[in-house]
Each structure stands twice: as C-alpha cells, then as structure tokens.
Image: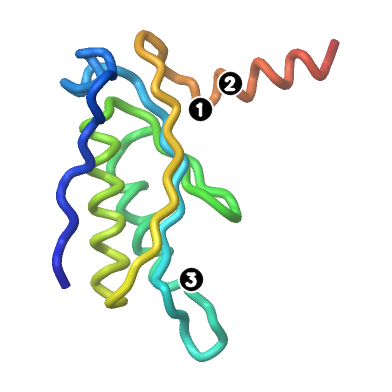
Amino acid sequence: MPRIEMLAVPDGYPADVKTGGAAVIVAFSVSPMGGDETGGVADAVAEAVRVVRESGLPNETNAMFTNIEGEWDEVMAVVKRAVDAVAAASPRVSLVLKADIRPGYTDQLTAKVRSIEERLRD
C-alpha cells in the first residue's frame, strides 16, 4: 500500500504555520473503507488512536473524532502515522480532518472547553 506524503500547509498561511511554529488543533477521523463481518472498524481505529496516544501530544478521543494539539508539523506527522496504521489493515482508508490554526495559543483543547463551561455557569 502506498504511503501518503506529509500534509503541507497551503500558500497564504503565516510563516510560523509553514515552519511548524504555530499551534494547531486537529480533529480527525480515520477509518478503513470496509469493516469486519458486522461492519465494525474498531480494531483498525484502535491502532490509529494508539499512534496518537503514544505521540505524547495532548489529545482526546470521542465517539466520532480524535483531537490532537501541537505544532503543525508534529500534529500532521502523527495524523500521517495514524493513517498508515489503518492502511496496514485496509487497502482503502477514509480521512476526515478539520484544523483550527491559531498562532500564539496553546493548551486550547482544555481552554476552549473551559471558556464555554464558564459561560454556561453564568
């Protein structure tokens, strides 16, 4: 199975994003395009989540996505390794990815949720 190349930052983003200096949160879902006999994909998805957790970057997993935070290059490298882990079990892989690129901000996985929770208490 061919491996994907590193995901590059498109033209027009600030230089610190292109060089990996900007903070980014990525929410992504990676899954084989086919499942087991019941349609389940848990084994392959678990391998992708294992890659993320072993990266040491702040992360969380919910029913639909895995969120990971760090500098662009390091986050995209982890996403690539997670895709490769699923590709090892399936000849076709689906990847859905959403990124929040916000130079100068860190610890946003918890800070963004905390901000909403504070507003809900008011």
At horizontal 39% and vertical 56% (from top left) the residue drawn is 95
At horizontal 32% and vertical 73% (from top left) the residue drawn is 92
Image height check: is 46 above or below 64?
Answer: below
Residue lying farthest front? 12
Image height check: is 121 above or below 55?
Answer: above
Q: Decide if residue 117 is on the left or right side of residue 33.
A: right
Q: Are marks 1 and 2 in contact (CB under 8 Å)?
A: yes
Q: Secondary structure at mark 1?
A: helix
Residue at image mark 3:
42
Residue at image mark 1:
109
- Front one among 45 and 100: 100
Q: Pointer 3: residues within 10 angstroms few (<14), some, or many (20+)?
A: few
Amino acid type at image mark 1: Leu
Q: Secondary structure at mark 2?
A: helix
| N-term mark: 2 or 3 | 3
Q: Pointer 1: residues within 10 angstroms few (<14), some, or many (20+)?
A: some
